Amino acid sequence: SKPAYKWRRVLLKVSGEALAGDHTENIDPKITMSIAREVASVTRLGVEVAIVVGGGNIFRGASWAGCSGLDRSSADYIGMLATVMNAIFLQATMESIGIPTRVQTAFRMSEVAEPYIRRRAVRHLEKGRVVIFAAGTGNPFFTTDTAAALRCAETCVWRIRSLTYPNRGVVCFSVNAEVVLKATNVDGVYDDDPKSNPNARLLDTISYQEVTSKDLSVMDMTAITLCQENNIPVVVFNLSKPGNIEKAILGESVGTLIGG
Ligand code: UDP
């Protein structure tokens, strides 16, 4: 069916795990290329795309903290640096197919990328450039999902009041929010863990409240709460299915919509 609404500016969250796919190395170049192609086709339609990349394919702070005296903050800084590697890889891939792309880091690495400056990021987006936000929030003890929610709240200025989804009815959001599109390796949010329960159902839509109270581990609490407080809808979808990024960006029914 025809998309009910096309997002004007989206924040695409790509986890590190999604970048790795089932490749034996940390990054599968076929995946980065397919992301680049799908993003290219929507930017040509005038949709503005910002991306937050994760780093879990290289280093996850929480799982290393405590080993051989490595404290959590140091481990998390290493994790944030991992996201910068992914960002540069993705930027180079995008530019190889002609999409102007800027990387902005949450802490300074000025020889490598621009520092994060909100107004400058918005200006890049307005000019049709893709902006990749790297180094998460710049703070240990946070995640790149929280960085996605934060950057979305900071940079999304399009005003929307309601969305009509085929089979989902009208979902209302307050103004000043756009959307976080969370690209993962699963099809969306299930009502139970699909690994342990074969009858688990894929949900079309779910409220923030249900995500937090049922502890569905879609996003960490900080990220989901930040989205809820700012009425930012989140679409969780499977990156490994070709065409899904385009569908998600074009507002077509894909994955699970969290909101309301
Ligand atoms: N990280 C952090 N602060 C942030 C974002 C990320 O300390 O604001 C660190 C943290 O150690 C995390 C790692 O960077 O484990 C990689 O990010 P994340 O786990 O969110 O990546 P993803 O799961 O999306 O691949």
Image (cartoon, helix red, strand yellow):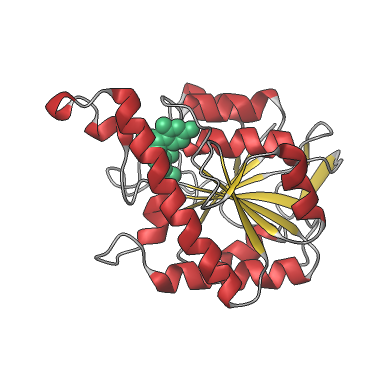
Residue 70, image x and y in percent? 21, 27
Residue drawn at the location 51% of the way across and 72% of the way down: 34
Give the quadrant of the C terminus: top right
- Decide if residue 169 is in sight here: no
Q: Name the residue furthest left.
A: 68
Tell which of 1 and 85 is nearer to you.
85
- Decide if residue 175 is in sight here: yes
Tell which of 178 and 101 is nearer to you.
101
Q: Based on the displayed image, in which of its 4 quarters is residue 91 positioned? A: bottom right
Can you say whether 3 is above or below 105 in the image?
A: below
Residue drawn at the location 59% of the way across and 62% of the way down: 245
Q: Based on the displayed image, in which of its 4 quarters is residue 207 positioned? A: top right
Give the quadrant of the N terminus: bottom right
Residue drawn at the location 30% of the way across and 32% of the way down: 75
Number of residue marks: 0
Residue drawn at the location 70% of the way across and 50% of the way down: 10
Residue 78, image x and y in percent? 34, 38
Q: Is residue 168 left or right of residue 212?
A: right
Q: Name the residue furthest bottom.
A: 97
Can you say whether 1 is above or below 11 in the image?
A: below
Q: Is residue 118 left or right of residue 84?
A: right
